[in-house]
Amino acid sequence: MTSHLIHEDLPDTADPAVSTLIASMNNPFAFGHPVSYVKLIETHISWILLTGTFAYKIKKPVDFGFLDFSTLEKRRQYCEAELRLNRRFAPQIYLDVVEIRGSETRPRVDGSGEVIEYAVKMIEFPQHCLLSSYAGNHELSPPMIDAVADRVSGFHATSDRAPEESDFGSSALAARWSEENLVHIATAIPPEYLPNSYFELKRWYRENDWLLQAIDERKAAGFVRECHGDLHLGNMAMIDDEITLFDCIEFNPELRWIDTISEVAFVAMDLHARGYPEYCWRFLNRYFANGGDYAGIQLLRYYFVYRALVRAKVEALRVDQETLAGDSYRELLTPAIDYIGLAAQWAASHRAGLIVMHGLSGSGKSTVAAQLAEALGAVQVRSDVERKRLFELAATADSESALGQGIYTVEATAATYRRLGEIAGAIMAADFTVIVDATLLQESQRLALLELESGQPGKRIIIECEAPEAELRRRIVAREHDASEANLEVLTRQLQTRQPLSSREREIARVVTIDSAGLDASKIEEIRSLLFS
């Protein structure tokens, strides 16, 4: 079948031999198998040739300092590294490293003659499978976001930890890469176009250099791991109804051996930047609930800012300063400026606050808490999940514990609420809002949370969920695949022992009541106003 090279420009390289090679791949006989077309996708570091069945990724002969593909042998080594590393995520896509032999004018994959180039051979999948395409078409859904969080948290749980003696994930490297972002942005964007938020971010970095110690503490605790490194929606695809990660960083281990929270922040930032702030928080909450790494929230803002500035740098470097000026130049800089603005927005945000859920089992606490977490930008911490984590049980596992026994003894409940307090304090100390999702039927339990000292000023709210007893019983009976193990016997005990809100609690916190109809927009705005105004 006749093929055609779908690309308007010549390949972007100063080497005419390489330009000839890429142009010569516009030949159905260059691949050794039937092709439907030859389509070229070009990035600043590679060419990807699509053929309808297979894709071939060829690395550009470039040296950017942090990346060096300048020799054929280096390109071979990095092709092999790309194959090995990406098979961790997508072994069904990454097939082999192939040799391109012959000459620049008559190349052939796995042909005869001298090896002139190497390529990573992959299964081609439609571009509409990319989650970035779903986002652009407004087709992202809550189940997709949950699946992304499950995929990422599962991968992080099993990935290798960085050797203690290495510099990977250290505060020195974090500071260096952050500084390089600022330098490159100032180089790529002329002074007259740099927004004030850029200079505010430079000041923010100076004022928050105390976070560098936390970065080293995280590494010592084992949270620097061999991650993906470039995890955004453009490097995730929905293939065979499963979230598939691909195209990780192979060219620089410093950018791959990172704190897991840095990778998490990249996904969250990308969702926010693409117009999905609610899904940003849905992803974060699912990830934290899966793995329990609430301590990482201390560095979430730092790495969110870092990732936004990485994207600002990349977007700024795309713009050719030499050939554009005036309004056209300003318009092309808009994506970079927007990323700087997003970074500044997160850097300047002060969102410490505490929402204490309160109500009988089946009253809708967890549903309301999850809705608020997305709408307000908050972290939901659920007692049912954390109780089981203390006993090394999966969230939806059946503990087979009778009322008052097993994981529901008085001692286990006390330990669970202590843990909830520790997590809530850490989240508020990081200047974020936490929603503690538990029955909290005893005044002492509620006061222990309401009187937490976090080091950050933040308002306290109690959300009291109510529903008729008959509705509570109906919901409990209908539950499936939920972390809560509350049954009708538990509900009867709760009805007998619950304590109403006291005058002391009402002095500390504002109380909002949600009935069985659930949360609506006006209630969300009321709670938002109480927290942040």
Image: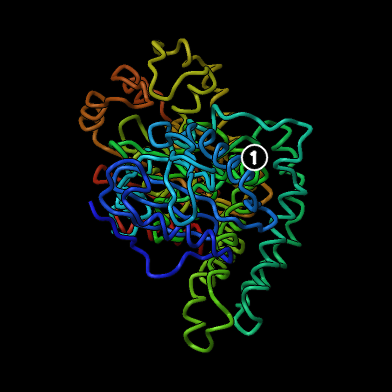
Residue 273: x and y, percent?
46, 61
What scheme was used to colour the molecule? rainbow
Q: Nearer the viewer, residue 486 or 66?
A: 66
Residue 101 appears anywhere in the view: yes
What residue do we see at 71% from left, 50% from top?
A: 174
Q: Residue furthest front?
A: 113
Q: Which SS class for mark 1?
A: strand
Q: Nearer the viewer, residue 248 or 197?
A: 248
> Would residue 39 appear left or right of 416 to someone viewing this image?
left
Residue 264: x and y, percent?
53, 44
Q: Nearer the viewer, residue 164 or 342?
A: 164
> Would residue 94 appear left or right of 184 to someone viewing this image?
left
What residue do we see at 45% from left, 59% from top?
A: 42
Whether 45 is drawn above or below 171: the answer is below
Snapshot quadrant of residue 311: bottom right
Snapshot quadrant of residue 186: bottom right
Q: Nearer the viewer, residue 317 or 39?
A: 39
Q: Residue furthest bottom?
A: 326
| Amino acid type of the residue tagged 1 in the rendering | Trp
Residue 215: x and y, percent?
71, 44
Residue 261 appears anywhere in the view: no
> Would residue 389 appear left or right of 95 to someone viewing this image?
right
Whether 495 is drawn above or below 28: the answer is above
What residue do we see at 46% from left, 28% from top?
A: 385
Disc 1: which residue = 257
Residue 244: x and y, percent?
39, 39
